[in-house]
Amino acid sequence: MLRKNNIKLFVRQQSGKLGAVICAARQAQGLTQAKLAEALHVTIPTIRKLESGDASVSLHTCLAALLILNIEKDVLHTPQKERQTLPQVETKQRASFAKRLQLQGENARDAENSAWILSLSPQQRVQVLINQEKEQSLCGIARP
């Protein structure tokens, strides 16, 4: 089973790499942090956080930066042999997780959805989040 500390370390490492890629692309295109912030409708400190790999920057801002810098395909569509993936969760563990969520008061549907998300590869999880962002945007639902 994947330990919480391993997840934190993985997220920190990958956030740092993503920030460095975004920073390098911005500089290569001759954009200042201020211009990128303006294009993303965020503040310059948010751009600094994004480029330094601060994982508190919203997924929406990260994905928007990739699109504006035209590097989303490079970042999101890495060849399989180059991907660093999280271990997959086995079906037995998924069922156990869903059962624990139900015991903690989650309704059955939420528990099933959480267990389903855990069964996806990291790339599939990113695609699910992108799709959710698009759906929320189309429906006019603001994220907190």
Image (cartoon, grey):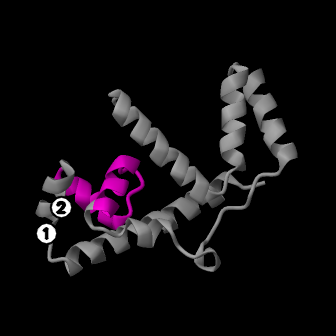
Disc on res. 36: 2
Q: Main secondary structure of the magenta part?
A: helix
Residue 72 placement (x, y as % from top left): 39, 65
The residue lying furthest to the right in this view is: 92
**Tally of marks:** 2
The foreground one among 129 and 21 is 129
Residue drawn at the location 78% of the way across and 22% of the way down:
103
Q: Which residues are magenta?
A: 43-67
Circles 2 and 1 in contact, beta carbons < 8 Å: yes
Determine if the magenta segment contains residue 49: yes
Q: Is residue 103 left or right of residue 139?
A: right
Q: Is residue 99 left or right of residue 139?
A: right
Identify residue type, mark 1. Thr
Identify residue type, mark 2. Leu
Residue drawn at the location 67% of the way across and 34% of the way down:
113
The residue lying furthest to the front in this view is: 138
Residue drawn at the location 51% of the way across and 69% of the way down:
77
Q: CA distance from mark 2 to mark 1?
A: 6 Å
With respect to residue 111, does 46 lie above or below?
below
